[in-house]
Image: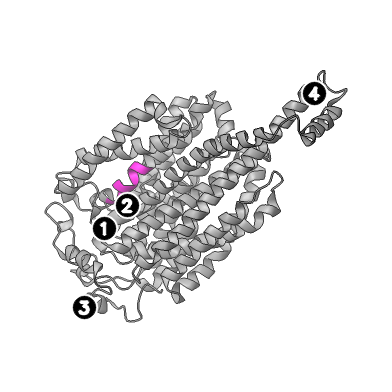
Amino acid sequence: MTAITNDDTPSARSAAPPADAGGAATASRLQALPPPAGRDAAAPSPSSAGPRPVTTRDWLGFLAMVVGMFMAILDIQIVSSSLSEIQAGLAASADEISWVQTSYLIAEVVMIPLSGMLARILSTRVLFTIAAAGFTLTSVACAFTSSIESMIVWRALQGFIGGAMIPTVFATSFSLFPPEKRAGVSVMIGLVATMAPTLGPTLGGWLTQSFSWHWLFLANVLPGIAVTSLVWTLVDVDKPNPALRKGFDFVGLGLMAAFLGSLEFVVEEGPRQDWFQDEYVAIFAVVAAVSAVGFFWRVLTYHNPIVELRAFLDRNFAIGSLYSFIIGIGLYGAVYLQPLFLARVRGLNSLQIGTIMFVTGAFQFLSAPIAGALSKKMDLRAMLALGLLLFGTGVWLNAHLTNQSGFWELFLPQAVRGLSLMLCFIPVNSIALGTLPPEQLKNASGLYNLMRNLGGAIGLAAINTVLLERAALHMNRLGDNLNLARPLVQETLDGLAAKFDGLVADPQAAAMKTLARMVEREAMVLTFNDCLLLMAGVFFGGLLLMPLVRRPGGKPAAADH
């Protein structure tokens, strides 16, 4: 793996100075300080006893954890192509049904940073077992619910409990496996974390078309039982630290939940409700701002904070988290935009949309071994830059849609985007988490994964805002050109009226309605292209930060003491 030098033995890591200087020196000195009372002082350093060999038992337990993470990420998007069927089944309104997805996201965003503290108190084994069992039970409850209100409650619980599985897998991959095995593990985690959102609409559409929407949730039962059993039986990577329960920061937890939950509500509902013109959006924006101030004050002053922000003193972690935010924009934004285009403009059903979307997932799968090999031979910074460049290029190629764009027109953009995702995900994981001391990994993994989810949420809010504003702009511009005094416009209307002659009572009115729908369709196509161009610009702009990323090396010496 490029991030680890050839002589990175345990003794070398303990004796070697930090691989970087300058900005890293401050972070290393801070990391060298003993943790304050009430934190992890009671827990022995994982590196003090030296790394233990990874057994078959460890591998099986870890693979079960990866399956659990896949389920948790998959369920963000699995309902996206079946919301109309769920709406009909629960007799919900169009505004209410969106909360089937929003409630899950809000709850998951709150749990992800909290999972680091819970893993230290309970241990990885206990936390993951509780999360997998709770996720399975709430999935059953979602399947058998009979009202939209109870569905929203169960989805929120499902997202909150299941959210603990995502960062726990990332932290475990760095604490359990030695450096020489992390490249292959990163490939597996990256493939799962990026394919789950891509496969969500495809799998969801197939389950709904073949069975019913209830199977979107019932499909979690058997894998959930297996994951719960295997993790409880096989996983043993750390010990609980009950001392951390003393002085548990319930005030910080409340402030964090209010901050992240309100922020997620604002960015989800703002575009649909004209932002601060809506009373509830304005109220939650104030709550988010006030609780954010309280949360950061509490975290920086309390002796045992709910989330430890010291990881951001590591420059690579801070920049890696920003790149995770950017990848979240592309990962969730592209999966949201393309099905929306195919449904609104092309009129395809969920199964047809899923078939087209499968191209991205297929190329992600094919690129996994290539990305894994490159991560061992290539500078991870160059690999990440290549991934960002390819993703931006794939989105740019996608930004030339027409009203006839279908499978083959979208094949190349999706293939390029699928190839690029693994080239982004593997190096950014190692850049962000690979230089942190072991005692910070669980907490930092939660913050890192939170940034990806926030990137997706804020990216979707920006996309919805652009869709509304640019659609109105293009409608006005195209409408200005529909002057009946223009010969071409009149000829088009006459041709349409001739087609309707004898079929409807008023051929001229039918022709006008048809022309209006054509204008609306073309305005939508132009709007989708604008969104995709903006997304491509975000990825190309991310390349400007690459000179700030340090070359990953061994862990700082202070981390091992």
* Label 1 close to label 2 by CB (< 8 Å): yes
Residue with the mark numbered 3: 15
Name which of mark 3 and mark 1 comes first in the sequence: 3
Q: Which of these two is toward me, 507 or 19?
A: 507
Say which mark, if any, is on residue 311: 1
Q: Is mark 4 on a helix, strand or loop?
A: helix
Residue type at the position of mark 1: Ala
Label 4, label 2: how far apart the Cα atoms are: 60 Å
Name which of mark 3 and mark 4 comes first in the sequence: 3
Q: Is mark 1 on a helix, strand or loop?
A: helix
How far across and down, in percent of the image, does residue 107 sit?
A: 37, 39
Residue with the mark numbered 4: 508
* Label 1 close to label 4 by CB (< 8 Å): no
**Within-10-Å neighbours for mark 2: few <14, some 14–19, many 20+:** many
Name which of mark 2 and mark 3 comes first in the sequence: 3
Residue with the mark numbered 2: 447
Residue type at the position of mark 3: Ala
Instruction: Tell us which disc is closer to us: 4 or 2.
Output: 4
